Image (spheres, rainbow, N blue to C red):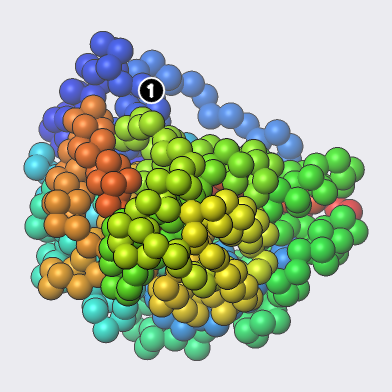
Amino acid sequence: MSKQTDHTRHPAVDDLKNSFFKGLLTRRDFLRYATLLGVSATTAGQMIGLSGPRKALAATPRKGGILKISSSVMKVSHPAQLSWIQPTNQLRQVAEYLTWTDADNLSHPYLLQNWEVSEDLQTWTLNLRQGIRFNNGDLFNADDVVFTISQWLDKDVGSSILGLMGGYLPSTGIEKVNDYQVKLHLKRPEIAVPEHLFHYSAFMLNHRTFEGDFIKAPHGTGPYLLKEYREGEICTLKRRNDYWQNNLPYMDGMQFVDMGDELAPQLAAIKSGDVDYIDASLGLPATAYKALKSEANVNVDITPTNWTRVLRVRVDTKPWDDNRVRTALKLCQHREKILNLAYMGQGMLGGDFHVSPKHPEYCEKALPKYDPQKAKTLLKEAGYPNGLDIDLAVAADWTDVVRYAEVLKQDAAPAGLRINIKTMPASQYWEKWTEVEVGITPWAHRPLGTMVLNLAYTADENGKPVPWNESRWVDAEFSALVKESNGILDIKERSKVMCKLEQIQMERGSIGLSYWVNYFFAMSKRFQNAKGHPSGYMMFNNSWLNKG
């Protein structure tokens, strides 16, 4: 990214710098917000005295080898429609993003050279890198950016990005300035645009060849070519020789093998060396960590994350349209017990609002206590003196989710809630995850608390729940506060609004949230310079395989 001049640098950057030196802003938050405002990570570090030489690699990279990965190989058509991370880990090697957000929540240009933002945070200028080509030889340019973003905002496509960005970016707000510059004209201020451009389904598409099915025309700017894709079986990738990042990638290819939903064969395969990596897109269970942590040929990387499991109900169905019933269910969560039994205590407790203690705008709240008697009273007031029978949908292969459901079933019984756990394969759950009346859904890591609030708990301009609003819960006051918080740069002021948002979700929301998880990434020791990303994304351009 080119260095910004004092003339082009957003004026708030100097305010952030002053706040940092006054002790009002942490180093991490200064770097986060300075990079979001278009300052490179290197320049931002220099501004607060963190300049220094780039660390050299611990070892000399080795060329060659095929990385073998255990991963579900799911049905793929339009990338923007994807609602799970596993297939994006496969497509991510072929197609790429305009930006990327690293494990420290710092956002960087990727297919962009840089970006600039207006003082009011409503005009974002995206400057593209020049000379990048798709793997079919077509030149990547502004037409591809305009086409791709227009796809995200097309209601007929049905992308989750519509819920993330559609509230502030109208379809008429995408302007091609020239072949390598695009401007986004927002309806309201939004600080997190660079992070939204790294949403896992936000791949840049080739506007000349894409007709709705990426597998039929797998033309991306990424380091690998898609050679084979058989749903439920295998995905094979081959190294590009003309990739725009010189001398990368190091490996000759990748092979994703679908080994089914059972964990035991995958653990056996990595122990024996038959695979080098287990796709942890939805998190390896704590049992896998326990089984692998002492293996001589396996590394287990532990990463704290904003991943969670959300107990949610459909508020457009009875009895969940009654907040007393929703609250009764939430009161049956014994949080410490659930975290300890479901995930070996490897995580943080949650409080029925979808904002993590690791989010920069988090507002600390006293967590609700387990109270089955109060829950029983609320059910009686709601007209259910004899309790309720509940079908709870969960995926059988998410072992901690199943355990969460089992503990909840046991602890909800004294309140009169009789829970029938309905297990199914994960693939089946994802086919109907927005439709089940009561379910427990894994939600991915997001660097900002407001990102998931936009995705999962708001409505579109017509008042209809956005595509990923699985609970159908829409609250006018909540939605207004989410919009307000999106445009607040000052972290303390943002946190004040977040306090109100968290309280609303706790008091009248549609979810129970007991814990946030640490992520376990299992990889063979011959796989070098690889580290788990808290989002579960595989970005291994700089990784390599030793012989073995």
Residue beneath the point at 21% across and 66% down: 459
Residue beneath the point at 9% across and 57% down: 187
Q: Which residue lies furthest to the top in this view?
A: 22
Q: What residue type is labelled 1?
A: Arg
Which quadrant of the figure contains the N terminus? top left
SS at mark 1 in the image: helix
Q: Residue furthest front?
A: 385
Which residue is nearer to you in this view: 248 or 205? Answer: 205
**Residue 411 versus residue 398 in the image, above or below:** above
Res. 477 in view: yes
Q: Which residue bears the numbered disc 1?
A: 27
Q: Residues within 10 Å of mark 1 (few under 14, many from 20)?
A: some
Q: Quarter-wise, where is residue 536 in the image?
A: bottom right
Which residue is nearer to you in this view: 330 or 65? Answer: 330
Q: How far across and how far down the image is residue 229, in percent?
A: 62, 82
Which quadrant of the figure contains the C terminus? bottom right
Residue beneath the point at 35% across and 53% down: 378
Q: How far across and how far down the image is residue 439, in percent?
A: 48, 67
The answer to whether 367 appears left or right of 335 in the picture is left
Residue beneath the point at 71% across and 71% down: 261
Q: How far across and how far down the image is residue 227, in percent?
A: 63, 80
**Residue 263 versus residue 487 in the image, above or below:** below
Q: Quarter-wise, where is residue 368 in the image?
A: top left
Which residue is nearer to you in this view: 400 or 12? Answer: 400
Q: How far across and how far down the image is residue 95, in percent?
A: 47, 68
The answer to whether 501 appears left or right of 174 in the picture is right
Question: Total number of numbered labels?
Answer: 1
